[in-house]
Image (cartoon, rainbow, N blue to C red):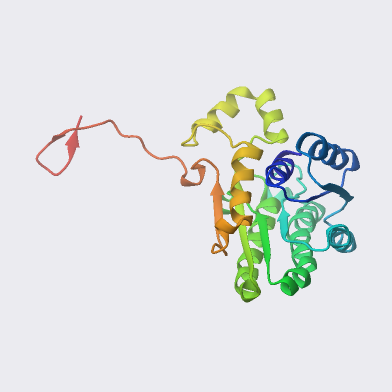
Amino acid sequence: MGIGRGIARRLAREDASIVVADVREDLGAQVVQELSDALGARARFVATDVSNKESVQALVDATVSAFGRVDILVNNAQTFTELVPLEEKTDAMMAASLDSGAWGTFWSMQAVFPHMREQHYGRIVNFCSLNMVTGAWYSVDYNAAKGAIQALMRSAAREWGPYGITVNAIAPAAASEGYLAFKKNSPEAAAAAEKTIPLQRMGDPEEDLGGVALFLTSDDGQYITGHTIFADGGGHMGSAWHPPRSTTPDGSGHFVP
């Protein structure tokens, strides 16, 4: 759902064959049905727990078995835990975030590498977050996982570039199901959050985030690797002081209203 579904739809619109991986079979099957019926895409669902190495390998094996190759990998799955201060985060919370985020990304990248190396072509898109830069409150486990994912991306971009594989990351701000639920329950807080974004809105998972993923996985993005793209409407710039407009110098090198 959310960003994963949006990217799957956007790539399917460009005639990509899609393998949907989800730990929830109902959601995965629903998206595949949608891709097939609405977009005429070649799509399959493989039940996958990205926090389990064997499950991730089985996903890649099933993909190659179905389509003969794997060209694109999008790593966007992530478990979320309770929002509590760092000192209250448990080992289990940290493990859940690292297993689904950092480890899941690491395992899937390793699993697709032999296939991409053999065909001398591959496009890998990982998902990190602005949270890892800002040290967002109450999500140290999530922040740590996303920071690790960015490091994985940069290391792979350097080591795997000679094999024709590009590796990049997207740090999004998206109107996913989770955000829409937050907006419904806390409309004033959501409105305040959106006002901090220069473009004054959250991104659409299919058109905005899917568009960035499409660029990075297309021929137009073939010379881009090792980058983190903040697809967040400018939110990564943070808030800025908005002074009153002034036009008259005061004689001291300053301007006054």
The image quadrant of residue 221 is bottom right
- Decide: is 18 above or below 102: above
Q: Is residue 177 left or right of residue 191?
A: right
Placement of the C terminus among the 4 image quadrants? top left
Image position of 166 (left or right of 243): right
Tell me if residue 60 comes above or below residue 30 in the rendering. below
Residue 109: horizontal and vertical position, in percent?
74, 65
**Residue 187 position (above or below residue 24):** above
What residue is rendered at 90% in x and 43% in y?
A: 25
Q: Residue at 64% x, 64% y: name it.
A: 153
In the image, residue 248 lies at what x, y percent?
A: 14, 33
Quarter location, residue 9: top right
Q: Position of residue 100 (x, y in %)?
A: 79, 54
Q: Nearer the viewer, residue 19 or 22?
A: 19
Residue found at the very far left of the displayed protein: 251
In-image side of 212 versus 37 (left or right): left
Task: Specify the quadrant that holds the N terminus.
Answer: top right
Asked if residue 26 can be seen in this view, the reply is yes
Q: Nearer the viewer, residue 109 or 35?
A: 35
Which residue is at 67% across, 34% downward?
Answer: 179
Question: Is residue 193 toward the left or the right of residue 70 in the image?
Answer: left
Residue displayed at 61% across by 52% down:
170
Residue 22 appearing in the image: no
Q: Position of residue 152 (x, y in %)?
A: 66, 66
Foreground of the two, 133 or 154: 154
